[in-house]
Image: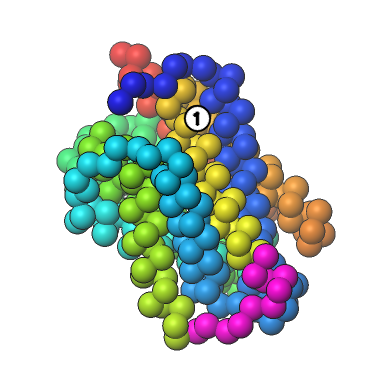
Amino acid sequence: MTPARQNPALAALLIVTASAFLAATTLLAKALGTNTLGPALHPLQISHGRFLFAFLVIVSAVGVLRPRLSRPHWGLHIGRTSFGWVGITLMFASVAFIPISDATAISFLNPVFGMVLAIPLLKEGVGPWRWLAAAVALTGALILLRPTPASFQPAALLALTAAAVIGMELIFIKKLSGRETPIQILLINNAMGLTISSLAVSFVFQMPTPEQWIALVAIGVLMACAQACFVNGMARADASFVAPISYATLIFAALYDFAVFGVIPDVVSQIGSAIILTGGLILVWREARVRIA
């Protein structure tokens, strides 16, 4: 497989586009999880729609592109998909109760959890700069949790748990990277996710309204497009260049939440989000320095 030609400008555009798509999926999940488009749907049904329609998009792409597929590592795929399904379901559940920008900011902790989990699972060493980045980011998350009796948001724990679960998913993605092509990974991931979510949704399924069907289709299509843009963006520039740009998701999430639901992030949200982003940027900076060295 020929590597994509390096093109930082195109990479930046692709990652910004992926960020806009990804934030839009959380906006639609919030609309579906509240009474905005009809009776609120269960998070399991929303995640089922995400996998169903994303799978249809990816199967169509495979049919057109006819990529060469190799023998998959089923154990890694099962692990990756299981944690990914739980993580996205918890994320969709959280945005029904807390601002989208808060849930998105907390989701940026997943690389931190992935770093910590890599110590026992991948035998990776973690130096003082990485621990500093983790401490800073977790401090921001603690602020967003608002841990006082008057302001504590229990639903924020759903987003925090989602970040931890997706951090575990990153371990499996790291093991899969280099073994199989991105489109094969996406195809198998969404096929397995559809299987798991189809079993789970059978217990909570309710007939969506026409507006909800449109939103469910949009979530799947947008997620597939976001994944495609992100994978292609990563292939065209260094990870240290791409990673900070992905934080644009937080900006889009705040804009969408304001435009549709009239939610304006308060001072606590702004401070907590800024601290989490600072921790993430420290981690990106350190990883770039290590690669250069």
The residue depicted at 42 percent of the width and 21 percent of the height is: 4
Image coords of residue 12 (percent x, y): 58, 26
> Which quarter of the picture shows residue 263?
bottom right
Residue 12 colored in magenta in the image: no
Using the rendered image of the protein, determine whether residue 184 is visible from the camera's viewpoint: yes
Q: Which residues are magenta?
A: 204-214
Using the rendered image of the protein, determine whether residue 278 is visible from the camera's viewpoint: no
Q: Is residue 18 left or right of residue 169?
A: right
Image coords of residue 52 (percent x, y): 48, 64
Q: Dot 1: what SS?
A: helix
The residue labelled by disc 1 is 233
In the rendered view of the protein, which quadrant contains the N terminus?
A: top left
Image coords of residue 241 (percent x, y): 49, 23
Residue 206 colored in magenta in the image: yes
In the rendered view of the protein, which quadrant contains the C terminus?
A: top left
The residue depicted at 62 percent of the width and 37 percent of the height is: 17
The one of 191 and 269 positioned closer to us in this rendering: 191
- Relative to residue 24, is residue 288 depicted above or below? above
The one of 187 and 16 positioned closer to us in this rendering: 187
The residue depicted at 49 percent of the width and 40 percent of the height is: 228
Image coords of residue 64 (percent x, y): 46, 42
